[in-house]
């Protein structure tokens, strides 16, 4: 199924356009990387606040309210530009385990973030009161989420150097 998807995508005018315009892929990469700075910047600030290292004068509620919309927009930009990077060379990323590992790590980071914020919100005090300390299990999850974002960046950069899985189209 993946092979027929790659063959179909490779025959579309979108792939032809991305292949023929030398500025197109670097431009898409620039937007992919700018969107990473927004998502990972916001995740770093919110999670370090949950750990209790920075922004201790601000509630977690205030910080998440400020960063939620830009993060959602940036995630949409990442998905769109990621799709364009696949379209530019359809046999490059999707036949590499590392690409799917990156997608799984991304789902884990987003899912854990939603769960952590929902748990903190339900817990009350520490979510809205800047003076209340966040319980240790929540702080551990925040550290784990930061490590996941770091792993996603490494995986994304590494895709280009990985081999396709055995028997995949090159
Ligand atoms: C649905 C979301 C995403 C898709 C479909 C996607 C897809 C891709 C693809 C296809 C590439 C090109 C890999 C190559 O051929 O070398 C790439 C590069 C990259 N991605 Fe993503 N990506 C997504 C989200 C993210 C996120 C959330 C991050 C990090 C927080 C990220 C970090 C990177 C990095 C660092 C690169 C290397 C950029 C470069 O070397 O120019 N991506 N991505």
Image (tube, helix red, strand yellow):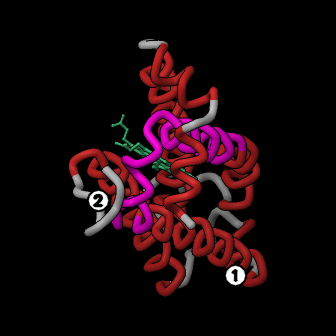
- Front-most of 141 and 39? 39
157 above or below 29? below
| Magenta region | 73-101
SS of the residue under disc 1: helix
- Front-most of 17 and 46? 17
Label 1 crowd bin: few (<14), some (14–19), many (20+), radius 10 Å: few
SS of the residue under disc 2: loop
Q: Name the residue under label 2.
A: 164
17 above or below 37? above
- Front-most of 5 and 114? 5
Disc 2 versus disc 1: distance between alpha carbons? 39 Å
Label 2 crowd bin: few (<14), some (14–19), many (20+), radius 10 Å: some
38 on left or right of 153: right
**Residue 144 location in percent, x, y?**
41, 73
Chain-order first, disc 2 or disc 1 = 1
Q: Is the C-beta of the residue carrying label 1 under 8 Å from the nearest atom of ligand 1? A: no
165 above or below 67? below
Q: Mark 1 points at which residue?
A: 119
């Amino acid at each position: 199924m993946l092979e027929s998807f790659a063959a179909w995508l490779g025959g579309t005018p979108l792939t032809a356009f991305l292949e023929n315009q030398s500025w197109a892929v670097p431009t898409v990469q620039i937007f992919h990387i700018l969107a990473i700075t927004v998502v990972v910047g916001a995740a770093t600030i919110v999670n370090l606040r949950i750990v209790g290292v920075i922004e201790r004068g601000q509630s977690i509620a205030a910080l998440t309210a400020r960063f939620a919309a830009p993060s959602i927009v940036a995630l949409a930009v990442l998905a769109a530009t990621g799709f364009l990077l696949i379209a530019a060379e359809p046999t490059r990323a999707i036949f590499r385990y590392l690409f799917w590992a990156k997608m799984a790590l991304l789902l884990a980071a987003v899912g854990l973030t939603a769960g952590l914020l929902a748990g903190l919100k339900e817990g009350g005090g520490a979510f809205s009161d800047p003076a209340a300390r966040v319980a240790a299990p929540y702080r551990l999850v925040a550290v784990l989420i930061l490590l996941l974002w770091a792993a996603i960046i490494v995986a994304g950069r590494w895709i280009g150097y990985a081999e396709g899985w055995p028997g995949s189209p090159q």
